[in-house]
Image (spheres, grey):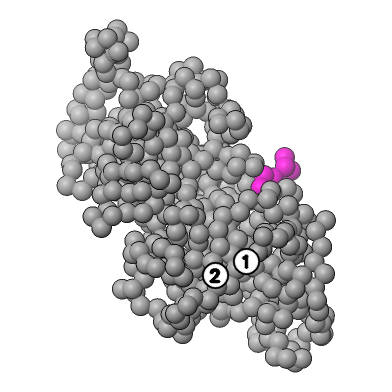
Amino acid sequence: MATSSYERIYRAPCPGCGAPVEFASAQASYAICEFCRSTVLRQGEVLQRKGSMAEVFEDYSPMRIGASGSVERDGRSEPFTLVGRLQLKSRAGVWSEWVAALSDGALGYLSEDNGQFVWSWPWTPQHQIQRFEPREWRLGRSLELGGKTFGVTSVQSVHLLSAQGQLAQLPEPGKPFQVVELRSEQGQVLSLEFDGGPPSLSLGGPVKLADLKMQGLREGPSIKGEQGRHFNCPKCGGGVPVRFSSTKSLSCPSCGSLIDLEQGMGQQLAYAEQHEPVRPSIPMGSKGMLEGLQWQVVGFQHRMGKEPGDDESFGWEEYLLYNQKAGFAFLIDSLDGWSMARVTTGLPQLNRRRDKAKYLKRQYVRESSYAAETTYALGEFYWPVRRGQITQNVDYVSVGERSKAFLSSENEKGEVTWSHGTAVSVTTLSAAFGVSHLLDRSQVGISSGGRLTIKVIFIGLAVLLMSLFAIKACTRTDCEPGQGRVVDASGQLVNQSGNCNSYTRSRGGSWGGFTSGGSHK
């Protein structure tokens, strides 16, 4: 087990209850008494009680105070121990940041980032930033800091829900402050916290828990065992098992209601009924080998998109995949065919017109821009998924290469999340997941010889008949949103909106997203 022999540990009785309060780092000015929840401020050798802290709601994170590991610092591997935790909330959701103490008393920070983790260190720029100016920190802006090019990817009003352990700084609970996050093409993450004056900053990059060699985690790195947590559905009362420590939303296996877990299972649970089930082509829970790793289907979404000025809508389906070592990935089924994508930590570089992008030395051109709406969801998700949730998406495709790649950006509630992916053949997916009936929508139409095949003719007639039926249904004077339904040849829902628009291609995905920032350092 990694050890953390600190240079000096300061202990003193809690001013609230007399229990011992410990400071393992000289940089830690605050501590939360684990017995009476008093907020304790250290000023030299004197401890002062500054009120009480709310209980941290149980989100079943694999992290916990006291867990240890090792991290690369200045080319050396150094041991650390988690000594503090902040629970934060913005419009985008709830997340945790963990404070890590090294043997010399230095502090580092480990935080959630779109189903992954970012490790960061306190950072001081050459030129001090004075205050938060909304026009200066607008989404998409590119700027130079410390000789590096960053782009603004998140601007959030954040407030502290609760805290544990030792902390360098402590925002006032419930009081909003501004957090700005910037990213570079190389994957660096820069966070700025504005709380009335010059911001505190941290700079870091992505890490994997396996590389941190952590010990003392709770029940493994992410997945719960068979005896993991569960609760009763707020709609039907049926049992709902929760598999992942990072789950923020999931569907009830009995009634299909979509349930919000952001506030923890001990709180009043919000839910949305889902009356029109969609059948995934790859069944939930399926396991398959892709890119040398075994993935499991843990989530599924049907989404609808609409481009500005276009009367027609289009639809696609997304599968959330999970691997214990690699984290999360996405399979996307659209009229462009099947593709596999992952969230990027790095930020693609855009030109001034934002119609071209460069990422990892590849060039991309903008293909489409549209609003995307979630219409149905199954399974578990590491970000808050809600029926009717709308994001603004932009897709880019690679230039002049046989192996087509794509980039997708998704903007929701002051945060932009990017993903990168490539095409996957139906043959590969069918073999990987043992599903023989997968359809490649990009190949439905003309055969390789330029003639319509009998199968395609049959599918076309079926789609035509279903479309005529849907059009007839939509000509009724009582056709309201949600009453007109169009299904494809495999029986899957294509459009459940009352306007009965057509099904066209989309490459976009829903990556959710939480800022990894907030320095609080």
Element marked by disc 1: strand
Q: Position of residue 285 (x, y in %)?
A: 58, 32
Decide whether residue 226 is among the magenta residues: yes
What segment carries the magenta color?
222-230
Decide whether residue 408 is among the magenta residues: no
Q: Is residue 321 visible?
A: yes
Does residue 140 appear to the left or right of 145 in the view shown? left
Q: Which residue is drawn at 36% across and 71% down?
A: 137
Q: Position of residue 53 (x, y in %)?
A: 65, 77
Quarter in which the N terminus is drawn: bottom right
Q: In this view, does 131 lie above or below 305?
A: below
By secondary structure, the bulk of the magenta-drawn segment is best described as loop
Instruction: Name the image quarter holding residue 367.
Output: top left
Element marked by disc 2: strand
Quarter in which the C terminus is drawn: bottom right
Contact flag, marks 2 and 1 (Cβ < 8 Å): yes
Mark 1 is surrounded, within 10 Å at the Cα level, by few (under 14), some (14 to 19) or many (20 or more) other residues, namely many
Q: Residue at x 55, y 50 (%)?
A: 115
Q: Mark 2 points at which residue?
A: 202
Mark 2 is surrounded, within 10 Å at the Cα level, by few (under 14), some (14 to 19) or many (20 or more) other residues, namely many
Q: Which residue is drawn at 49% across and 55% down?
A: 187
Q: Mark 1 points at which residue?
A: 109
Q: Viewer-proximal residue, 56 or 26?
A: 26
Q: Where is residue 456 in the image (x, y as percent from the top left)?
A: 30, 13
Amino acid type indicated by mark 2: Ser
Amino acid type indicated by mark 1: Tyr
Q: Residue at x 58, y 39 (%)?
A: 322
Does residue 406 appear to the left or right of 169 in the view shown? left
Q: Viewer-proximal residue, 448 or 452?
A: 448
